[in-house]
Image (tube, helix red, strand yellow):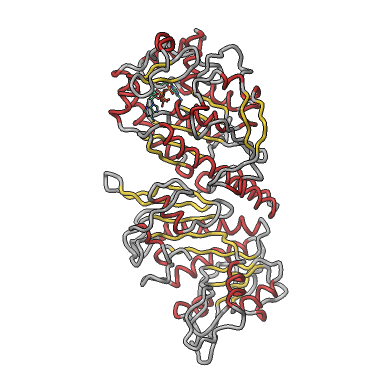
Amino acid sequence: MAPIPTSNGIRSPNTFSPSLSISTVHSIPLSFSHSSSPSLSSALSLSFPISRRFRSLRFDSSKNPITKGLKVNCSVGGEPLKVMISGAPASGKGTQCEMIVQKYGLIHISTGDLLRAEVSSGTEIGNKAKEYMENGLLVPDEIVTAIVTSRLSRQDAKEKGWLLDGYPRSSSQAQSLERIKIRPDIYIVLHVPDEVLIDRCVGRRLDPVTGKIYHLKNFPPETEEINARLVTRADDTQEKVKSRLETYKKNAEAISSTYLDVLNKIDGNRPKEVVFEEIDSLLLQVQEDKVKMRKSNNLHGKATIENAMLSNMTSSSQDNWRGIPTRLNNIPHSREIRKYFYDDVLRATQRAVEDGRIRLKVEINIPELNPEMDVYRIGTLMELVRVLALSFADDGKHVKVCVQGSMGEGALAGMPLQLAGTRKILEFMDWGDYDAMGTFINIGSIGAKEVNEQDDIFILVAPQNAVGNCIIDDLKAMTDAAGSRPVIIVNPRLKDLPSSSGIMQTMGRDKRLEYAASFESSYSFRLLYYAGTQYPIMGALRMSYPYRYELYKRVDDPSGKEKYVILATFPQKPTVDEINDAFTGKPRNQEKAASGIWNFFSGLLG
Ligand code: AP5
């Protein structure tokens, strides 16, 4: 007989009432002192759980050094954690869920348990589900989805956060959640080799009294009395496990692709405490990110950002972003690829301007726009600028497109080579059929005198410091004159360059850097390579306002096709260490190895 799950989907012996939920947890707040997340101290509280449910639960937290006696309150300023856990049969989902629930107090919703409860109660749903479950097949979507969505919509799940275990199990189930805008903060996938899975299933035993999961070899019961009452799950035979495993593998990739932006793959073939330690550190990180977001949103007070960041939305699900185009090292890029990126930049920048942002920076380094590469095409940059300018002009704004002129004596003195001739190109470009040029769009250079009363918005083409000349003084004078009107700098290079004369600027270095940093990113995209090379592409980093930085890794699938998978997201531009850690699969906040091949990003991300 299967264990007796509750209608909450919790593998607990307490089957009596759905009200046996988290609402029975009482807590005594403690001050917070987690070594890896000191900044959480003000926003999170820990508490001793005194819970009817936990007192008789299968997991003995007092024996676990990690969760021992502590419970994290997950409702961070009214935004509780939303966690999905997935993995093959017997990968340890249930085992890890026990520990997560114990520490984080999330509402554990296990579809397997919910269904087994229906089966053992002999309900209509249970009778329908039984045959599928016994054959290791998926129960039809309409049955499972209805159960899950109704459970998720209950108040306790909204207040305390949820831990969804065993759902979604197919692409259509994932899409059902997407449609009703239910997304996790983090999607954890436990990976365990097939042969280990089979052994785990066949050796699994359940205690119908406490609901605790045992394994004949790995976690034998503590006493003879418990041993005598253990039961085996009906679907834990070798043959059925194989069929469950097949079903899992068929669906796994499609589901993961829905949650690429929050996906974290974890090696589940380690002692359960070690696996939990990794999950725990990820969850703490997610919480910390949420707290930071909330603080920063409070500062900015912008509803759009708040919504986007608090729900940990990434642009992939919100923004027509279909992922990184492949074969980006093939140049010139096709018109479609160029257009795809222009649209992406445009959407992000429009959102930022609509949100009242006034000092914006677009940084896009696809190969054609990467001035470090020999294919740098000023025409592509101009095309991008035209898309931006025409779009704002279409909205009735007077746009001034500015490119810096010579900054010294002589026609090209102090003029960065990449920009030579740019102004002429701008003047000769096709600016649309309705005579936008000269009316809604005007061309100028960089400086205060370019700012006229009728100008609504300024787009500055690649302002850059050149050896011996610093653009920042002119730029600052211009932004001062523009006041609260938006100034968008496209592919700026405002870092110090070595100067032979040593007299490069009037402002002090700190002030210059501070000024350059005052432009916030509305869009950022760059490909990542090994240091000193431009081939092969290792990954990419993308940010589209107001969403998070998304780190992608390029992989070649067995058919030889290249694709990009998202490794991690970050609220701020990640450091080289954070990128290295994500590429080497290290959980955040862990110590980094001294060095290695992945040190290749240094210098690229400044
Ligand atoms: P469900 O109950 O969800 O089964 P499952 O996904 O096959 O997962 P299991 O419960 O078997 O394993 P687990 O990963 O929780 O591992 P556990 O921690 O117990 O679903 C059952 C059925 O319901 C499905 O086949 C389907 O028919 C139906 N169903 C459910 N959801 C559905 C949906 N969304 N749509 C349609 N149908 C659905 O651990 C396993 C064993 O390993 C234990 O003995 C444990 O002690 C041991 N163990 C755990 N961790 C470790 C470790 N680190 N080291 C060593 N041993 C370990």
Residue 602 location (% of width, % of height)? 41, 64
Residue 594 location (% of width, % of height)? 38, 57
Q: In this view, does 148 lie above or below 492?
A: above
Whereabouts is ligand 1, in terms of quadrant? top left
Residue 481 location (% of width, % of height)? 70, 75
Quadrant of the rendering where the N terminus is positioned: top left
Q: Say left or right for 160 vs 326.
A: right
Residue under the image location 41 percent in, 17 percent down: 221
Q: Which of 277 and 233 is in front in this view?
A: 277
Q: Say left or right for 6 vs 395.
A: left
Q: Is residue 551 above or below residue 269?
A: below
Q: Say left or right for 159 vs 422.
A: right
Q: Which residue lies furthest to the right in this view?
A: 453
Q: Say left or right for 546 vs 412.
A: right
Residue 546 location (% of width, % of height)? 59, 53
Q: Quadrant of residue 338?
A: bottom left
Q: Residue furthest bottom?
A: 410
- Tell how many labels: 0
